[in-house]
Amino acid sequence: MVDLGKKHDNTGGPVEATKSENKVYYPTVYISDKDLGLGEEDVGKEMMATVKVKVRGVSMNKREGDKKSHSIDLDILSIDLGKPMKSKTGNATQDAIEEGLEEQKVKKGK
């Protein structure tokens, strides 16, 4: 799994960062007119999803200072939401990433 979080780019700004500049932002998907079985009680919960996508475009731009910027444009064709995740450490997403990495090690015989 790839963590899609991104911190605010403070390039060219004041040296002292504000709390909002240290916040991690994630891409957002807005889905309307489909009942995915979620309710108000699910707001804020993390869950695993299986998503079928169509790649519409891929680009890489080189910025000043050799920083590369990658962009991917996806159409979300379908989605299957799992049950809310239970966390061992308080970060369910990180737990899932680490669990997936452990499963890969087992499959490779490491």
Image: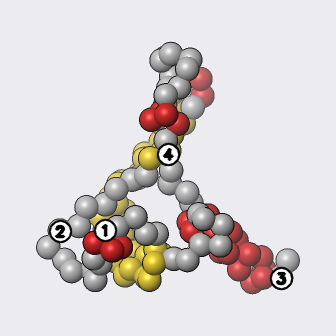
The residue singled out by tag 1 in the image is 76
- Residue in the image at 44% along x and 47% along y: 25
- Amino acid type at image mark 4: Val
- 82 is higher (above) or lower (below) than 32: below
- Amino acid type at image mark 2: Ser
- Residue in the image at 33% along x and 74% along y: 41
Q: Residues within 10 Å of mark 1 (few under 14, many from 20)?
A: few
Q: Quadrant of the C terminus?
A: bottom right
User: How many numbered circles does the render carry?
Assistant: 4
Q: Nearer the viewer, residue 64 or 23?
A: 23
Instruction: Point out which mark residue 24 bears.
Output: 4
Rounded to the nearest angstrom, the CA distance separating label 1 from label 4 is 23 Å
Q: Nearer the viewer, residue 96 or 76?
A: 96
Q: Nearer the viewer, mark 3 or mark 2?
A: 2
The residue singled out by tag 3 in the image is 109
- 20 is higher (above) or lower (below) than 45: above
Label 4 secondary element: strand
Residue 83 lies, in percent from the top left, at: 44, 83
Q: Residues within 10 Å of mark 3 (few under 14, many from 20)?
A: few
Rounded to the nearest angstrom, the CA distance separating label 3 from label 1 is 34 Å
- Dot placed on the residue nearer the N-terminal end, 1 or 2: 2
- Residue in the image at 43% along x and 82% along y: 82
- Dot placed on the residue nearer the N-terminal end, 2 or 4: 4
- 71 is higher (above) or lower (below) than 19: below
Q: Residues within 10 Å of mark 2 (few under 14, many from 20)?
A: few
